Image: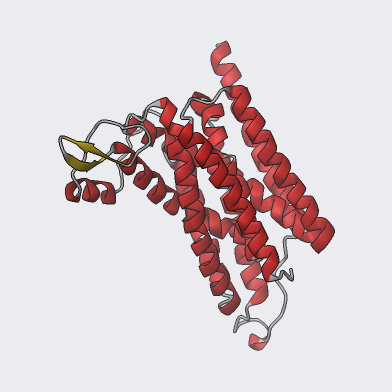
Amino acid sequence: MHLDTTTWVVTIALAVGVLAFDLVHIMRHPHVPSPKENLRALGVYITLALAFGVWVGVVHGGEFAVQFYGGWLTEYSLSVDNLFVFLLIMNRFAVPRQYQQSALLVGIILALVLRAVFIVAGAVAIAKLSWVFYLFGAFLLWTAWTVATEDTSQDAQYNPPRIVAAVQRVLPSTTQYHGVRLAARVDGRRVATPMLMVLIAIGITDLLFAFDSIPAVFGLTKEPYLVLMANVFALMGLRQLFFLLGNLLDRLVYLNTGLGVLLAFIGVKLVLHALAENTLPFINGGQHVTWAPAVPAWMGLVAIVTILGVTVLASLWHDRRSHGS
């Protein structure tokens, strides 16, 4: 893709504008969103993502559009998995329901900033070191196993990052919420509120999730612009998914198994790509030979849709049998 500076600036400005407007509105009117409100906003974000893919296809070619859709669906599916941890965070810090929107949205904005740094670093590494795909692929295969076997029930214990405890030791704090404020004056002194700890926990957690998701999207496209936009559109709808799914997350019993298969597929794809890009001393005297099978973008998209579809259908079938017995 050949993108000028204007395209980058306009795209980032629009994304920041949408999130800033959303944040100001929520901060001024904290409330528990209704299912109708969530569905309407989620529908807008999904429509925008689909329209963006069409624009990419028209301007830059269908191959890049397929790459974007694959990255977006992958990020979306991994973001759903993140909701398990966000639920645990909200329960651990007893965040009032009317303030959870604000905490999530600020956390999403922090996540976008952190992921943008990761994307730039990943793009530089890929441009200079083609063997980095071996590292990404191996990491995704290991992550696939850990994701498929981790405990995601809402009864699981959540241990806040150590930095949260460090902040609580350094800063005087209160256990009482003061709206969405991060600090408040109590008994004549300035103290940190639990909302600050919630935002730190969400930010650190999403930073850890970025280690999984960013390599996964780079496994589907090497275009930093598409990786960034896949993250933007996936995170934009995360707040609505949090309130829409809620307790329904426990019904997706095969979600982590499906995500494990998805990450393993992308990990294998990355390794195959690395084998095709790099020379090996024991093949044709170390000369560059494209011998590893390539997985085309359309096949990756079909695999992603199939894996996620089977995961959801199998989970619903299991839930129906469980409640019927």
Residue drawn at the location 52% of the way across and 57% of the way down: 140
Which x, y percent locates residue 76?
Answer: 60, 44
Quarter occupied by the C terminus? top right
Which x, y percent locates residue 107?
Answer: 45, 45
Extreme residue toward the top, this view: 325
Q: Is residue 229 above or below residue 105?
A: below
Q: Who is closer to the viewer here, 325 or 102? A: 102
Residue drawn at the location 54% of the way across and 58% of the way down: 214
In the drawing, does residue 1 fall left or right of residue 163? right
Q: Who is closer to the viewer here, 133 or 43? A: 43
Locate residue 296: give its quadrant: bottom right
Q: Who is closer to the viewer here, 177 or 127? A: 177
Q: Is residue 298 above or below residue 181?
A: below
Locate residue 294: give its quadrant: bottom right
- State how many labels appear: 0
Q: Is residue 28 above or below residue 277?
A: above
Q: How is the image coloured?
A: secondary structure
Q: Is residue 314 above or below residue 280?
A: above
Which x, y percent locates residue 109?
Answer: 49, 49
Quarter occupied by the N terminus? bottom right
Which x, y percent locates residue 123?
Answer: 58, 69
**Residue 95 shows up from this direction:** yes
In the drawing, does residue 68 fall left or right of residue 120? right
Extreme residue toward the right, this view: 58
Residue drawn at the location 56% of the way across and 27% of the way down: 244
**Residue 259 shows up from this direction:** no
